[in-house]
Image: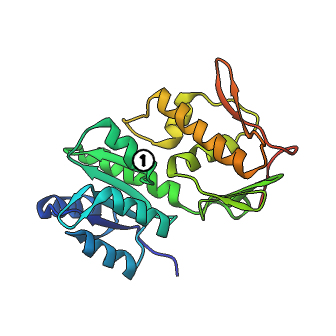
């Protein structure tokens, strides 16, 4: 039976902040659960997977970055927002690269948090049955499993790399600017720098090429950005 309400898990050792977030999210009609430690968060996830986790980076018994890495590997469809008092841009890049969907530095504007969670819940809704998987000659992209298979082999991608590939593959042959690709990676006030997008695209290209016997799936379009170039005549949904 489908859930009537989105389920949000808050993993943060700040009890006062957690209580405020419970009240804030309840006003949106979302069901919330709190965990004040990494251990409690692990047990809550094992008991029942929520739609979104709000995860503090610094916990008394664990590192949020390591938790994010493990939880993303174990729960591919989990929405994951990292919360931290550390505003270093490199921390944000690290959080996104290891699998977080979004990243907010404390103190944050409550309305911004709600907007980020709402956007993530929309993104987490299952695609229509006829577009759950994009298939190309030699490549398939499963949105629900977050799984990419090239020439029969699973390609291990970070969260950023997967989102970049999906954004490009949904519009095969169409150049997308770095700004558009940044927006695909993360909706919100923080956007990766252009150089970050270039680095991620280079890594994505290499992984796809290595798994596809040298096929180059992504082209650079001078002055415009990047375009996904399928082997075959185009994508077909299934």
Using the image as rendered, state which of residue 54 and residue 122 is in the foreground: 54
Image height check: is 175 above or below 51?
A: above
Instruction: Pinpoint residue 153: horizontal percent, then vertical percent.
Output: 72, 61
Residue 108: image quadrant is: top left
In the rendered view, does 182 fall on the left or right side of 191? right
Instruction: Answer with left or right where residue 162 lies relative to residue 183.
Output: right
Left or right, 170 with respect to 58, comes to right
Report how many numbered discs are placed on residues in the image: 1
Q: Quadrant of the C terminus?
A: bottom right
Residue lying furthest top in this view? 223
Residue neighbourhood size for the residue with mark 1, other residues' Cα within 10 Å, grouped as few (<14), some (14–19), many (≥20): many
Give me the residue at 59% from left, 27% from top.
177
The residue labelled by disc 1 is 96
Q: Position of residue 225 (x, y in %)?
A: 63, 26
Determine the residue positioned at 49% across, 55% down: 122
The residue located at (36%, 54%) in the rendering is 81
Q: Position of residue 218 (x, y in %)?
A: 70, 37
- Residue at the far left in the pictured view: 16
Type of colouring: rainbow
| Residue 167 seen in this snapshot | no
Residue 29: percent from the left, percent from the top?
Answer: 34, 64
Q: Nearer the viewer, residue 118 or 98?
A: 98
Side of 126 relative to 18 (left or right): right
Q: Is label 1 in a helix, a strand or a loop?
A: helix
Picture quadrant of residue 128:
bottom right
> From where the camera sits, is residue 161 visible?
yes
Q: Residue at x 16, y 58 (%)?
A: 17
């Amino acid at each position: 039976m489908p859930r009537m309400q989105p389920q949000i898990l808050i993993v943060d050792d700040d009890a006062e902040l957690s209580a405020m977030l419970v009240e804030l999210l309840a006003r949106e009609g979302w069901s919330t659960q709190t965990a004040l430690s990494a251990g409690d968060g692990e047990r809550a996830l094992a008991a029942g997977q929520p739609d979104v986790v709000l995860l503090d980076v610094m916990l008394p018994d664990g590192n949020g970055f390591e938790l994010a890495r493990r939880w993303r590997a174990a729960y591919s469809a989990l929405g994951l927002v990292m919360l931290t008092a550390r505003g270093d841009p490199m921390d944000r890049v690290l959080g996104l690269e290891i699998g977080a969907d979004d990243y907010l530095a404390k103190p944050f504007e409550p309305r911004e948090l709600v907007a980020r969670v709402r956007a993530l819940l929309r993104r987490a809704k299952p695609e229509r049955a006829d577009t759950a998987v994009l298939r190309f000659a030699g490549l398939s992209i499963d949105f629900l499993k977050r799984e990419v298979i090239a020439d029969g082999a699973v390609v291990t991608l970070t969260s950023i790399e997967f989102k970049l590939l999906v954004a490009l593959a949904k519009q095969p042959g169409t150049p997308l600017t770095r700004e558009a690709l940044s927006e695909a990676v993360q909706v919100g006030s923080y956007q990766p720098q252009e150089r970050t997008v270039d680095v991620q695209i280079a890594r994505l290209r290499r992984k796809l090429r290595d798994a596809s016997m040298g096929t180059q799936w992504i082209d650079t379009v001078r002055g415009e950005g990047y375009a996904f170039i399928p082997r075959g005549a185009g994508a077909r949904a299934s």
